[in-house]
């Protein structure tokens, strides 16, 4: 395993896609504690955090040949955060039902708030990971509503460079929103399977 610990994440992902179980073990050992800390920080429940991190690793292994991962550490952290928020939302819905709210309500207001909070945190993380100039251009454009000319003047960049940074930022955000939709689908699919299996 010492050999595997010398590999970077990109190399481990390549080996993982080739069914290398020792590469998976290295990823597990490398990130378990960090992901558990993230899960506990958001759920404040060690057992829930452990179960979520365990499920994320199972998902990683089971989908190893088809899953699209650009950067492993942010992907794993996002998967854990999303799972925690969905777990909190389900618990909120369960409590609402126990208090006598009708079953036909598709989602509680709390769940929508949690989803919105997660999406904002997720997008903030994506923007924060952009290269510095790209991040500044995007921030000036979206948060301060500056025109491309105003951004170019402020940052002393050409108009074309500003447009290039904006295009790159939006392309990156669209890519990670694709991952966000994947996490949403995966968790809903898992929950559906769990309910179905319980009825068998």
Image: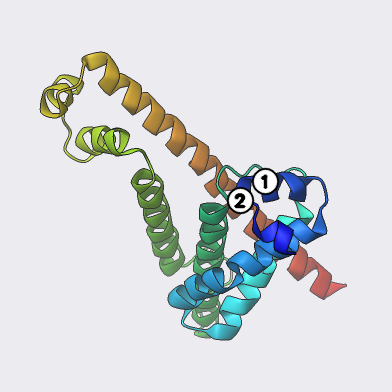
Mark 2 falls on what kind of element?
A: loop
Q: Residues within 10 Å of mark 1 (few under 14, many from 20)?
A: few
**Which residue lies at the image location 33% right of the left edge and 26% below the top edge?**
165
**Residue 89 seen anywhere in this rendered image of the structure:** no
Q: Between 148 and 85, which is closer to the camera in this rendering?
A: 148
Q: Is residue 135 left or right of residue 97?
A: left
Q: Give the farthest residue toward the right.
A: 200
**Which residue lies at the image location 71% right of the left edge and 63% below the top edge?**
2
Expressed as whole percent of the image width and height from the top left, the position of residue 183 reads 59, 53
Residue named by callout 2: 8
Q: Residues within 10 Å of mark 2 (few under 14, many from 20)?
A: few
Residue named by callout 1: 11
Q: Between 82 and 191, which is closer to the camera in this rendering?
A: 82
Mark 1 falls on what kind of element?
A: helix
Task: Tell me the CA gap for discs 2 and 1.
Answer: 5 Å
- Mark 2 touches mark 1? (CB < 8 Å): yes
Residue 23 numbered tag: none
User: Which quadrant would residue 114 be assigned to in this image?
Assistant: bottom left
Expressed as whole percent of the image width and height from the top left, the position of residue 110 reads 42, 69
Q: Between 64 and 82, which is closer to the camera in this rendering?
A: 64
Instruction: Point out the image quarter for the C terminus.
Output: bottom right
Q: Is residue 161 left or right of residue 190?
A: left
Q: Relative to 39, does residue 114 appear above or below in the rendering?
A: above
User: Which quadrant would residue 139 be assigned to in this image?
Assistant: top left
Q: Between 90 and 52, which is closer to the camera in this rendering?
A: 52
Q: Relative to 145, does residue 199 appear above or below in the rendering?
A: below
**Which residue lies at the image location 27% right of the left edge and 34% below the top edge?**
133
């Amino acid at each position: 395993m010492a050999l595997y610990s010398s590999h970077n994440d990109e190399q481990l992902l390549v080996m993982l896609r080739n069914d290398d179980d020792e590469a998976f073990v290295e990823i597990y050992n490398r990130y378990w504690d960090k992901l558990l800390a993230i899960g506990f920080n958001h759920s404040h429940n060690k057992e829930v955090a452990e179960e979520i991190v365990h499920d994320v690793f199972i998902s990683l292994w089971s989908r190893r040949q088809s899953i699209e991962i650009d950067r492993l550490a942010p992907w794993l952290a996002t998967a854990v955060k999303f799972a925690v928020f969905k777990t909190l939302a389900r618990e909120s819905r369960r409590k609402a039902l126990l208090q006598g709210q009708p079953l036909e309500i598709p989602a509680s207001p709390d769940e929508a708030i949690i989803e919105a909070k997660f999406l904002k945190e997720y997008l903030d993380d994506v923007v924060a990971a952009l290269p510095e100039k790209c991040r500044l251009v995007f921030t000036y454009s979206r948060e301060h509503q500056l025109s491309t000319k105003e951004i170019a003047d402020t940052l002393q960049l050409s108009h074309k460079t500003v447009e290039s940074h904006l295009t790159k930022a939006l392309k990156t955000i669209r890519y990670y929103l694709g991952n966000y939709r994947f996490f949403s689908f995966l968790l809903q699919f898992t929950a559906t399977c769990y309910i179905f299996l319980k009825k068998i």
